[in-house]
Image (spheres, coloured by chain):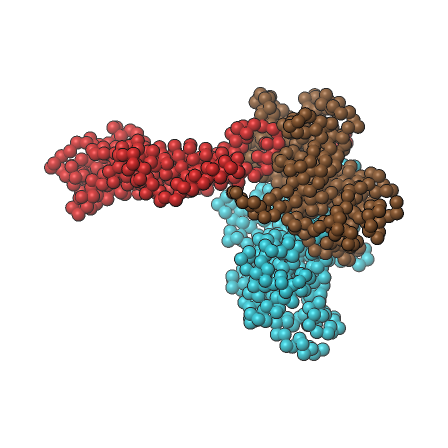
Chain colours: A brown, B red, C cyan
Amino acid sequence: MHDTSQAATLPIADDTRDRGGPMQPLLIVEDLKKHFPIGGGFLRKAPSVVRAVDGVSFHVDKGRTLGIVGESGCGKSTTARLLTHLIPPDAGSIVFDGDPVGPYGGITVADLRKQMQMVFQDSYSSLNPRLPIVDSIAFGPKAHGTPTRKARADAEELLGLVGLNPRQFARRYPHQLSGGQRQRVNIARALAMKPRLVVLDEAVSALDKSVEAQVLNLLARLKEQFSLTYIFISHDLNVVQYISDRVLVMYLGEVVEIGDVDDLYSAPSHPYTQALLSSRPSMDPARRRIAPPLTGDPPNPVNPPSGCRFRTRCPLAEPICAARAPELAALPDRPGQSVACHARGVGTGHSLSPAA
Amino acid sequence: MAHATTDTALAGSYGAAAAAAAKTPGYWGGVWRKLRRDPVTVVCMAVVLLIVLAAIFAPFVAPNDPYATSMTRRLKPIGTDGHLLGTDELGRDMLSRLIYGGRISLFTGLTPVFLATLIGGGLGLLAGYFGGLVNTAVMRTMDVFYAFPSVLLAVAISGALGAGLLNVLIALTVVFIPPICRIAESVTTQIRTEDYVDAARATGASTPRIIGTHILPNVLGPVFIYASSLISVSIVVASGLAFLGLGVSPPQADWGLMLNTLRQAIYIAPVNAVVPGVMIFITSMCFNMMSDGLRSAMDVKD
Amino acid sequence: MPASPALSRQPWLPKRWRSTGSRLEALVAPTPAPAPVPSERILHVEDLGVRFVSRDGDVSILNGVTFSLDRGEVLCLLGESGSGKSVTLRTLLGILPPTARVSGRMDVDGQNLVGASESELRRVRGSKIAMIFQEPATALDPVFTIGHQIGETLVEHKGLSWADARARALQLLELVQIPSARQRLDAYPHELSGGLKQRAMIALALSCDPKLLLADEPTTALDATVQIQVLLLLRELQRELGMATVFVTHDLGVACEIADRVGVMYAGRLVEGADVAAIIKDPLHPYTQALMRSTVQAGMRGKVLDAIPGSPPDLAMLPPGCSFAPRCRHARAHCLAVAPDLIRLPGAGAGHSQRDMRCHIHGDEEAYRVSAPVTA
């Protein structure tokens, strides 16, 4: 058990940085967009763009975990990097604890980064191979003026907190650690900045199952200990269900459904969410899946289909779906769950659209 | 805090499981261990060290005065008593001249590479890190220099500046900047996309600090290894310039110059005429193989 | 039953497929009734060991692996990274690096391949064994079209003419349910999506009519909605063509979908092997039990996961006893000292076959019973 003196040096529940109060969402994202030009170059205009993230909006409440799921190319990892401004967004606004992020009023990107940290999927590539891990962890605080000795002492304390004995591990290099140990170091590095929000981008996806469980337990403990808020990005539906309070489903750069985890998993509304959930292996050899819920691969995000982007694979597609993109709207009977689907929205002109 | 109990218990066994592997060497320890298993590289390093030391301590090492001429003892063959490597066309002791000549040849071999690494490496680093217009500006300029064959460029520059050691150094530096810059740029561009650089940016650290801590140490290795392979080229080209009369002038001892002056004796004493060439060959080979060995020893991934 | 005229005009059609009522036959001829197939042993692996020798010393990667496989059976090798599951496949295919030393025996269709010459291995690879890799993008040659790559194999190993090979390649692409297969025949790998590439890879593997199919995490790199399609396709093909399949995965769910039998591997040893239902419903080995407990499943939300402490051992420094003992909650002193032998437990319950096991708990050694428990 860790004594409280350790925790005292690190953020605790009612810290002074909580400006908006408990009801203010920690993060509000409005209409975030990022289009990557491809094939262009010096003095040449790009012939096409990848609409990696195309109008994503959501909010995360304090102390909660938002899970983001989707297949490759759906824009979930780009979204993570847009949030921390590792990639500058083309459009959209980010409001952190009531303060808009941007050059005019509110807080700067640098202020935001102090409170928001990221953990990446590839535990090896996210650590500098030539730096002992203790220095990797201490790098951020040192850059913000913490004296080297103090930063290193804090880093060793954090190593202990993530389950690595500092006397044994502090001076090791990344290639001398196992994948699970490296991911613990990456978590410690993120915590060294005393963030309030941690973005976990496929943070456990590359780990073995037995190690994955250890790291998930660690994340749950740290969240409690430091009053953290998580954005947990993964393609693993079971893990997202385990760790999240709310879940956001993305398809080709757009949000198709968002809702509380139990509602969304027990009663998925968007046809894509339904397909995604029933694509999970059954875990029961006596009741195996008979037919795949979808055929084909997700289309190329370079030239996404018109209207609703899922319509090319959707069993409910009708002409209206090609003509007009559906808006993300709350379900009439479940206000906490929002869906972007003509078949679920009221008065959309789809034959399955519920009466108002 | 149910989480804490299980997880601390975990931490304990984590440590126990790893305790067996605790005594692992650091990065340089690993490099040294790999080097020791590579006798060719070790021998080459020893030869380079020997040549460098001999050049530095030439007055103590050289058996004779390298400038003392003797009309009677001209072009003595290798193994002559008192002249281990024979004498040259003016009767000067070859061994002593080679040892003294190493001073200038190594100087003209190392200095341009060093300067070019500083300038080219720096430019490449900036071009790679910032990308976009900076990259275009720097790299297209380098492409202009790349358009000329390196030896021709060196001859042209030092020809325009006139003979003399300093001008040779300038010419060679200009010649070596583009290739080093290109290597530095490509390595930086690749490291720039690694997650640890993104993680460092996410902490809000300043750009110089990110470059200093995360980019430079990782770029330095490949650049240094490539540059060390240029040392041999530098020695050869500098010798060539001296041979053309664009480098140092007689009676200074320099391997290239010695090759030049002994050329007239090639039909009388072919072995003597070849000796400086052999010296250049050995030195450049050793630098080359040493950099090759270092490259594989410094690769962290295996 | 005599083959139909349509079939006899297709010399490239493998003989075995004519009697199994495959999808392929449905494409070319009226389907004859499937004949009952007698059980036939395709693969028998006994005491297989692999060591990598180097100047740093020997590292034992695989140790005493024993299993066998009948025609039409799917064996899933389940394990974490470093457990030896992929090495087993590579050993079967004979594509280990030259520093590897293989011991024991492995009979493929009655022929022992341990110590076989390179040319023998090549013949077996061309005719009896095929492999599907995890990354179709790297396993397919980027400079040739899909049709060319499949055709080349057919020309080389089956001696078909290029025209016949192309026709056969088209049918293989249809067999693996690639839409608009005729156009895709002339597509380069990079023009296909991940799922289609993996289907093309499967078509390539099936081109030589293998008796033994080796699949190395073939669905791991795919998206969820594509993974299930490829899994179901493999299951269907496997049933229709009657191959014996060794399927390597780290994913319990995938094993549940496709396996007849499951072999759980840990640190280079097969620690438990049984019918898939028996393994899932009633795991007996402590490692299998722990693995199932720590796998995140629906309905575990909010609970602390029962993780296995520590990490898998370094194969270069394996403990003298049971490799799992340092992480095992049932370990006794005897477990740390002596590695358990392979024992065969009789089938428990109705319809369950016997089960292979490497664990002292299920053995009958006196030494284990009297030794003291170790607190891991």
Which residue is drawn at the image coordinates 71% and 38% (left, top)?
A: A31
Q: Position of residue A134 (x, y in %)?
A: 58, 29
Residue B171 in which image quadrant: top left
Viewer-proximal residue among C297 and B185 = B185
Q: Position of residue A267 (x, y in %)?
A: 83, 45
Asked whether residue A277 is in view, the answer is: no
Q: Against A115, is C245 above or below?
A: below
Q: Position of residue A335 (x, y in %)?
A: 84, 39
Query: Would residue A302 appear left or right of B92 to someone viewing this image?
Result: right
Q: Residue furthest left?
A: B72
Q: Position of residue B129 (x, y in %)?
A: 52, 35
Which quadrant would the C terminus of chain C be assigned to in this image?
A: top right
Q: Against C90, is B143 above or below?
A: above
Which quadrant would the N terminus of chain C be assigned to in this image?
A: bottom right
Which residue is drawn at the image coordinates 76% and 40% (left, top)?
A: A247
Viewer-proximal residue among A286 and C280 = A286
Q: Residue furthest right?
A: A355
In the rendered picture of this protein, how many numbered marks are placed on residues?
A: 0
Asked whether residue B91 is in view, the answer is: yes
Which residue is drawn at the image coordinates 84% and 51% (left, top)?
A: A352
Residue B246 in which image quadrant: top left
Which residue is drawn at the image coordinates 43% and 39% (left, top)?
A: B141
Query: Would residue C121 appear left or right of A109 to someone viewing this image?
Result: left
